[in-house]
Image (cartoon, helix red, strand yellow):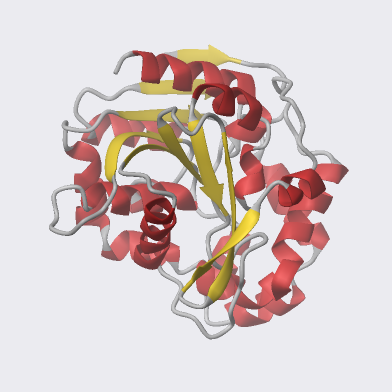
Amino acid sequence: MKTHLTSSSAGSRISLSDWAAGGRRISYRGHSIFVRSGGDPAAEPLLLIHGFPTASWDWEALWPALTERYRVYTFDLIGFGLSAKPRVYDYAIVDQANLCEAYLKGEGVHAYHVLAHDYGDSVAQELLARRHEPGARPKILSVALLNGGLFPEAHRPVLVQRLLLSPLGFLLSKFNSRATLAKSMRQIFGPETQPDDALIDDFWSLLNTNHGQAVMHKLIHYILERRQNRARWVGALQGRDVPIKLIDGTFDPISGGHMVARYKELVPQPDVTELDGIGHYPQVEAPNAVLKAYLAFRATQ
């Protein structure tokens, strides 16, 4: 199914300061993690997992509508946003998945749904891959994915990502600027849904909180992890025992229409909503369209 949009759908705005004030802290491996939850505690649990290089605030426009329907949990992955960003740390997708499970267990969640984006897609794929493995863990009931590098052969990183991944990545981490971030973001948003200066300022603030620039070259190694774990993570998408949905902004140069084409080739009976004219951040650029597609997906279960 394709949806054509010429401008961003209006979402209910939650300022970054209000978002931060509405959260709390938990400890993971001795580090402080920002978490946020909302909605009826008796409702079905939904976990939101954000992408690189931003944070859980990416979901703010969807938050009011989702918390009306579900018990919603989200957090800033370690190394991101308002969470700790230790310089000496083995950042890995598997560890981020462990953090997800630790957070949910701490909340008493036994089964949950996932809505993920970008880097969070890889975390969701790892969580999905664990579903038949031994061990006591919360059970995944469904997975919805927004733009992300689901298949490493179809992922097209932008220049900044390639440079961060290079041997000189640590230097770029030190000298990255707001202007660099703004240029990269404007390249990956849709032509009619461009981020304004205020949004760039908030993204920049989140990136710099807790000296985040110093670890960007370590976080970017998730691109290599996708290659190393391709069989496991792609295989996780090809099982039919958990409903999976892809909602994709097709204008995205990183994981847009070309990623959708690959998804349709590799995933049996693919359930896909394509958002024409929308870039890499559908939940920011077109929150109403994402909400509509997500609710339709959940209604089929």
Q: Residue at x 65, y 27 (%)?
A: 64
The N terminus is located in which quarter? top left
Q: Is residue 156 above or below residue 98?
A: above
Q: Residue at x 26, y 56 (%)?
A: 230
Where is residue 141 drawn, in percent x and y? Answer: 28, 34
Where is residue 168 drawn, in percent x and y? Answer: 59, 81
Kindly tell me whether residue 286 is visible in this rendering.
no
The C terminus is located in which quarter? top left
Q: Quadrant of residue 95?
A: bottom left
203 vs 32, left or right, is: right
Q: Residue at x 43, y 64 (%)?
A: 222
234 vs 293, left or right, is: left
Residue 255 vs residue 90, the one in the foreground: 90
Where is residue 140 drawn, in percent x and y? Answer: 29, 40
Residue 282 vs residue 50, the one in the foreground: 50
Where is residue 9 drawn, in percent x and y? Answer: 69, 20
Q: Residue furthest right?
A: 197
121 vs 251, left or right, is: left
Residue 128 vs residue 38, the one in the foreground: 38
Q: Quadrant of residue 162?
A: bottom right
Q: Residue at x 27, y 46 (%)?
A: 128
Counting the numbered discs, the total is 0
Kindly tell me whether residue 193 is visible in this rendering.
yes
Q: Is residue 88 above or below residue 240?
A: below
Q: Quadrant of residue 14?
A: top right
